[in-house]
Amino acid sequence: MTTTDPLLWAFVALAFLALLALLASAWPAWAKALLVAAVTALYFGADHALEDVWGWPSTRALPERFVLLAAVIEEPSSTREGALFVWVNALEDGKPAAQPRAFRLPYSKDLHALLDEGMKKVRQGITQMGSAEPKSGPKGLSWLRPGATEQDVKVRDMPSPQLPEK
């Protein structure tokens, strides 16, 4: 039994109650149609929300500052679009977050080379720190501009911690 099983059974019970309401009630047709639309929207909303719980890589923007833990490169081919999968720990107030997060980035040769070089250094024991800033572009509503979620990603060696004097 996984942690999402109770949620699955709750949805099955809700769908069953909706079916009973549709078949055995004297509700008007518009109310039944609204019930069907609400249950359908709940299904897709829960599926989208559970993607984060199930461990799928996020397609959201990378954190502003992060520690690079791992990267997997999927180069594009004639049958599939390429992707860059990165596992990072967000830096919050200069400290790594409690849990790492996986992200899926669109493939680009420049970012491929940058992550490849960063992973070589990680394998050598040199911690890599990254930053992600939104690409600047025309002003206006971001959802109207194609590529508005693209980021400029930079990876460099983590600076050595400054120890206080004795």
Image (tube, rainbow, N blue to C red):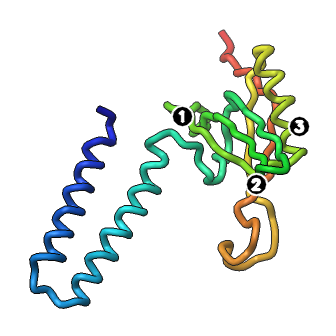
What residue is drawn where x is 64% and y is 35%? 88
Q: Secondary structure at mark 3?
A: helix
Q: Is residue 23 above or below residue 104?
A: below
**Within-10-Å neighbours for mark 3: few <14, some 14–19, many 20+:** few
Q: Residue at x 60, y 39 (%)?
A: 102
SS of the residue under disc 1:
loop
Residue position marked by numbered label 3 in the rendering: 113
Residue type at tag 1: Ala
- N-terminal-most mark, 1 or 3: 1
According to the image, label 2 marks what residue?
Answer: 151
> Pointer 1: what residue?
97
Residue 85: quadrant of the picture: top right
Q: In the shown orientation, is residue 143 left or right of residue 133? A: left
Quadrant showing the N terminus = top left
Of the two numbered discs 1 and 2 in the rendering, the one whose residue sits closer to the viewer:
2
77 displayed left or right of 36:
right
**Counting other residues with Cα less than 10 Å from the Cα at mark 1, is it few (<14), some (14-19), or many (20 or more)?**
some
Q: Amino acid at mark 3?
A: Ala
User: What is the distance, in whole Å, between disc 2 and disc 3 at their CAs?
Assistant: 16 Å
> Which residue is at the front of the view, 70 or 165?
70
Which residue is at the front of the view, 134 or 16?
Answer: 16
Q: Amino acid at mark 2?
A: Gln
Which mark sits nearer the N-terminus, 2 or 3?
Answer: 3
Q: Which mark is residue 79?
A: none
Mark 2 in CB contact with mark 3 (< 8 angstroms): no
Question: Alpha-carbon distance for marks 1 and 3?
Answer: 26 Å
Give the x, y percent position of residue 97. Answer: 54, 34
The quarter of the picture where residue 45 lies is: bottom left
